[in-house]
Image (spheres, rainbow, N blue to C red):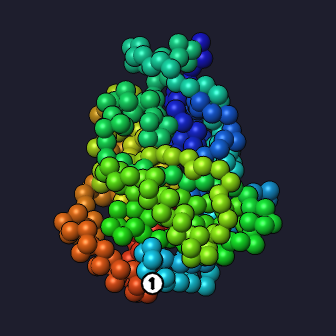
Amino acid sequence: MDSCDVLIVGGGPAGSSCAWALRASGLDVAILDRSVFPRDKVCGGWITPAVTEELRIDLDEYRRGRVLQPIAGFLTGRMGGTEVVTDYGRPISYGIRRCEFDTFLLERCGARIFQGAPLTTLERSGDSWLVNSAIKARLIIGAGGHFCPVARSLGAGARSEVAVAAQEIEFEMDPSQHARCSVRAELPELFFCADMKGYGWCFRKENFLNIGLGRLDEGQGLPQHVAAFVEFLKTTGKVTFDLPAGMRGHAYLIYREAHRRVVSDGVLLIGDSAGLAYSQSGEGIRPAIESGLLAARAIVAARGDYSESGLAKYRGLLQSRFGDAKEDWSTAIGRRLPTRVMSGFARLLLASGWFSRHIVLDRWFLHRDVPALV
């Protein structure tokens, strides 16, 4: 029988960031993950300077042997509409490969790591938990993504929730493919669906190419939208070769659609298991990392009282950081307008350089108005 104070189920950015923030707390922290790292993780994959500041990542150290693609701007638009280039003239984000980024964070987090070990049983034993009949822990943190088993133990029903569904692929281009890809590495391209319920992206990270599309899952036929986007990339000359493999799917909850219980006796949920992805962009890396850091603050403040009331500070920290889980103005308008009207409205707005820069990019995707956690 092994034992620890805190067991984090999931070694992705949320879990490893929480463990990293707890490394000076004196607590014995362990991470359990069903995968063996480095793992193949489907994700668009970019981080903002706020993330590197929050995690104190030395960019020169990180780029040694890893992909770190500076992003100086974006090309945005509506599929088939006017394309707008926004160039900031300096790096405002960095493209990363999740197989490298997640491993980097996990290896430096300072926790004991159990890899290749899925959570199979979770039983309450007094004021502790018994995991897989092999590990005893006073506090369990669910960081296993949308289908996290710890979230299920708190009543989450991933199959019945309204989530964002996405399909994407990432691969290293050969010389022929490289010559037939016009997308600039420092300028990822984002294209919204006509109804504004999702968007596709084409993103070069040095010699790796990531293509995908995600949209709110309301029975609208994701595969058809993905196929239409890939055809759009071909007909516009952006990517004129056939993709080397099929796309892989995944799902996640955006914050305004999430209604998960994030705190209970001896349990916290962080990252995608808590449903914290940004509403407009669906980006989840920064919210995942910040939720891990906030969870660590709440755990330290609890001083060993891991009852629901003792951990209640975490719920307040989330609300303070991410706000109430309610519709923003753009989503509220979009839900009430007929699709044809919304499509025309979106075409006009996305053709505006001011709207593309200050609303789509600065607010929805980069969250430049939100300072890093300190």
- For residue 190, side relative to residue 154 (left or right): right
Q: Residue 229 appears at what percent x and percent y?
A: 50, 64
Q: Quadrant of residue 370?
A: bottom left
The percent coordinates of residue 244 (x first, y second) are: 68, 54
Task: Please report the residue visible at 25 percent of the width from the left and 72 percent of the height from the top.
Answer: 340
159 relative to 246, above or below: above
Quadrant in the picture for residue 268:
top left
Residue 288 horizontal/vertical position (percent)? 48, 50
The foreground one among 245 and 163 is 245
Residue 113 appears in the picture as rendered: no
Identify the residue shown where x is 48% and y is 77%. 76
Mark 1, residue position: 82
Q: Secondary structure at mark 1?
A: loop
Task: Give whichever of 68, 323 is nearer the camera.
Answer: 68
Amino acid residing under circle 1 = Thr
The structure residue drawn at horizontal position 35% and vertical position 62%, both measured from the top left corner, is 197
The answer to whether residue 306 is left or right of residue 76 is: left
Q: Is residue 140 above or below residue 88?
A: above
The correct choice, above or below, for 140 with respect to 337 in the image is above
Q: Dot 1, crowdedness within 10 Å: few (<14), some or many (≥20)?
A: few
100 or 175: which is nearer to us? Answer: 175
Q: Quadrant of the N terminus?
A: top right
Q: How many marks?
A: 1
For residue 323, above or below residue 219: below
Say if residue 234 shows up in the picture.
yes
| 159 sits to left or right of 135 | left
| Residue at 51% in and 46% down | 249
